[in-house]
């Protein structure tokens, strides 16, 4: 129960921040960002929310039921714009795919450079200690 209360609390804080400060982000995104910050700072322990998060992830499909029902109710409108919806979907998918790929490529290059620099530094230290 504590895990659900913590997650709900962060959602409500995110909703409060969005309404009071007129932040142009959804309240759940604000709450999730705050929750992540609190996890990294160690103010919230993962074990406190792990069971609730696992339960919610296991039953995530239920959260999509209202979206599907809403889409069915506006199906005539969707049918009229199916081509633009599909083009937008494809372009969004492609943008995410490319940006994720470029990000991973740049991070792996940076990681390789970092490991080479660390290896050469440790080699120099070893050589210096042998000559001492």
Image (spheres, grey):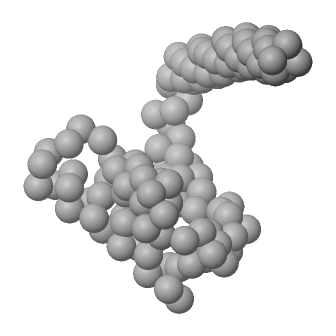
Name the foreground residue: 63 vs 13: 13
Q: Which residue is pictured at 42% across the width and 53% down the height?
A: 37
In this view of the protein, which residue sits in the foreground, 50 or 94? 50
Q: Residue furthest front?
A: 132
Residue 61 x, y percent position in the rendering: 68, 61
Asked whether the viewer can see residue 72, the reply is yes
User: Which quadrant holds residue 94?
Assistant: top right
Q: In this rendering, is residue 28 above or below 122?
A: below
At a point 62% along the width and 21% down the height, the residue shown is 96
Which quadrant is home to the C terminus?
top right
Can see residue 56?
no
- Residue at the far left in the pictured view: 20
Q: In the rendered view, would you say 42 is above or below 100?
A: below
Residue drawn at (51%, 33%) of the image:
78
Task: Judge from the rendering whether residue 76 lies leftward or rightward of residue 94; answer left or right.
Answer: left
Q: Nearer the viewer, residue 47 or 131?
A: 131
Residue 12 position in % (x across, y down):
30, 68
User: Residue 29 in the image: x percent, y percent?
Assistant: 40, 48
């Amino acid at each position: 129960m504590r895990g659900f209360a913590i997650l709900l609390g962060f959602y409500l804080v995110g909703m409060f921040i969005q309404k009071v400060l007129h932040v142009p982000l959804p309240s759940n995104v604000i709450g999730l960002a705050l929750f992540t910050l609190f996890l990294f700072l160690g103010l919230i322990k993962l074990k406190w929310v792990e069971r609730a998060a696992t339960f919610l992830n296991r039953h995530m499909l239920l959260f999509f039921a209202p979206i599907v029902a809403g889409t069915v109710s506006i199906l005539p409108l969707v049918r009229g714009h199916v081509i633009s919806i599909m083009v937008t979907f494809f372009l969004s998918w492609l943008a995410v795919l490319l940006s994720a790929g470029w990000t991973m490529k740049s991070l792996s290059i940076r990681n390789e450079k970092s490991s080479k620099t660390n290896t050469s530094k440790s080699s120099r230290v070893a050589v210096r200690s042998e000559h001492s």
